[in-house]
Image: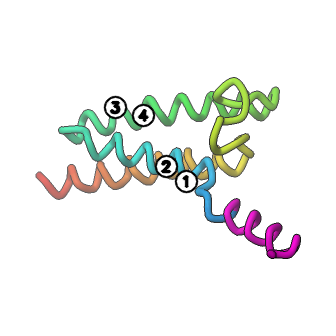
Amino acid sequence: MTSLLDQQLAAVSREFAKPSISEFLTRELDRKVNAMSSHAARLTFLALQGGSWAERYRTFCRTGAQPFGGPHPEYGEMAAADFVILISHISALQGQVKARMKEAV
C-alpha cells in the first residue's frame, strides 16, 4: 500500500510534467507558422498574432481578464509571464522569418 506522501509526490510530479500554458501556446504557434507556404504569409500571421496577444496582455494588466474568458480547460490561468513568453516568442519568430527571407535573396 502506497503511503500518502508517495501519492502526493506522484501528483506533484504529474503536475510538473504537464506543459505550461505558454509552452502549449508557443508549440501551437510554431505548428501554425511551419504549416504556412510562404514567408509573407508567416510574417502577416505573426504580425496579427503579435498585435492580438499584446492587446490581450494589456487587457489582462488592466482587468485581470483571461484571454479565453476564463482559465484554459487543460492548462489553467495565464500569468503575466506567460504573456511575455508568448509575445517574445512571436517576436523571435518574426526575426527568424525575416532572416530566412534575406538568405533567399
| Element type at mark 1 | helix
Quadrant occupied by the N terminus: bottom right
Read off the residue under disc 4: 47
Q: Amino acid at mark 3?
A: Thr
Identify the mark nearer the N-term, 2 or 4.
2
Q: Which mark is residue 44?
A: 3
Q: Return the residue nearer the eye: 84 or 74.
A: 74
Residue 23 marker: 1
Which comes sooner in the sequence, label 3 or label 1?
1
Near mark 4 (Cα within 10 A), the count class, few <14, some 14-19 or many ≥20, is some
Q: Is residue 71 left or right of residue 84?
A: right
Say which element carries label 4: helix
Picture coordinates of residue 80, whole percent (x, y): 73, 45
- Could you tell me which secondary element the residue under label 2 belongs to? helix
Determine the residue positioned at 30% across, 49% down: 97
Q: Nearer the viewer, residue 4 or 19?
A: 4
Instruction: Give the mark, 2 or 3, whose residue is nearer the N terminus.
Output: 2
Rendered residue at 23%/54% (across/down): 100
